[in-house]
Image (spheres, rainbow, N blue to C red):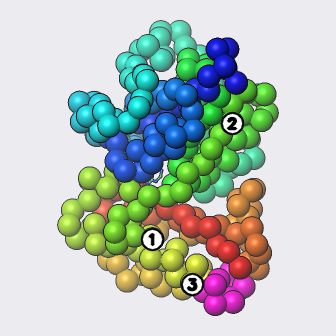
Amino acid sequence: MSQHGLTVGVVPTMGALHAGHLSLVEASCATCDATIVTLFVNPTQFGPHEDFQQYPRTLDADLQALAPYAVDAVFAPAVDEMYPPGFQTAVHVAEVTKPLEGAARPGHFDGVATVVLKLFNLTRPDLAFFGQKDYQQTLVVRRMARDLDLPVEVRVCPIVREADGLAMSSRNVYLSPSERRQALALSQSLELCRTMAAAGERNVAQMIAAAEDRFAAEPDVKLEYFSIADRDTLAPLTTLSHNGIALTAARVGRTRLIDNMLLSI
Ligand code: AMP
């Protein structure tokens, strides 16, 4: 409980808000006395050849999208307010940042952990709301909060999807109509694994082979990884257990997308 007996929730985002972000805002407003939304395209979590420059920046539309919610403050700092000249500190979370996104995007999670800690220090939240869409990120933030004794509870909200299953993402605007159709390989391969798991399949190699076949059907989609892992450690599984999650990343044309799905048995 914060100083005045009221709970503060924070929803950290990079803006270009869609219904996925707004579900976090709704959860915060429903849970907390005050809600702060942060909008900041954080340069330190982008690699040198990634889309920091092109990333959509839509401040006016974001403020309009937030208007129906009981948001108490929007924090949209400039890059040099967050990283003034002389800035030289980074937060590094170790093991859980190594596989998957951490392997594909060196330095990404240092950027994420550092900016999230700064945003926590600037907003002093009791609760912080993150999306399962960035599953590994939720593990990294939880680990950091525990390891550094941060007085904040991390809440994770379900993935919001388009009607056809594509996970909502600010990067979906990059997709051409053909790429938009082919991007369904991500959610559909995950769904395939979920169906196999529900039908009793426990052999992870079989599930990954089926998922890879689904990707192979799309000429403009390049699979980066498809992993079935322990949902706490992200260590790959060979036999599906109760604690499984499937995670994938792929390039659709020039756009890199990620998605994941919990697998229950
Ligand atoms: P971003 O602006 O991409 O950094 O995302 C800000 C927050 O919104 C992160 O916690 C994301 O996991 C979450 N988020 C992004 N897309 C979705 C989605 N489709 N469903 C739920 N949460 C999401």
Q: Earlier in the sequence, mark 1 or mark 2?
A: 2
Comparing 84 with 242, the one in front is 242
Q: Which residue is mark 2?
A: 153
3D distance between C-alphas at marks 3 and 2 = 33 Å
Q: Which residues are magenta?
A: 196-204
C-alpha span from label 1 to label 3: 12 Å
Q: Earlier in the sequence, mark 3 or mark 2?
A: 2
Q: How far, Cα to Cα, is label 1 from label 2? A: 29 Å
Q: Nearer the viewer, mark 1 or mark 3?
A: 3
Give the residue displayed 57% in from the left and 33% down from the top.
32
Please tell me the numbered disc located at residue 187.
1
Does residue 58 lie above or below 247 as drawn?
above
Q: Which residue is mark 3?
A: 195
Residue drawn at x 44%, y 76% is 188
Residue 207: image x %, image y %?
A: 61, 83
Q: Residues within 10 Å of mark 2 (few under 14, many from 20)?
A: some
x and y percent of residue 62 in the render? 30, 35
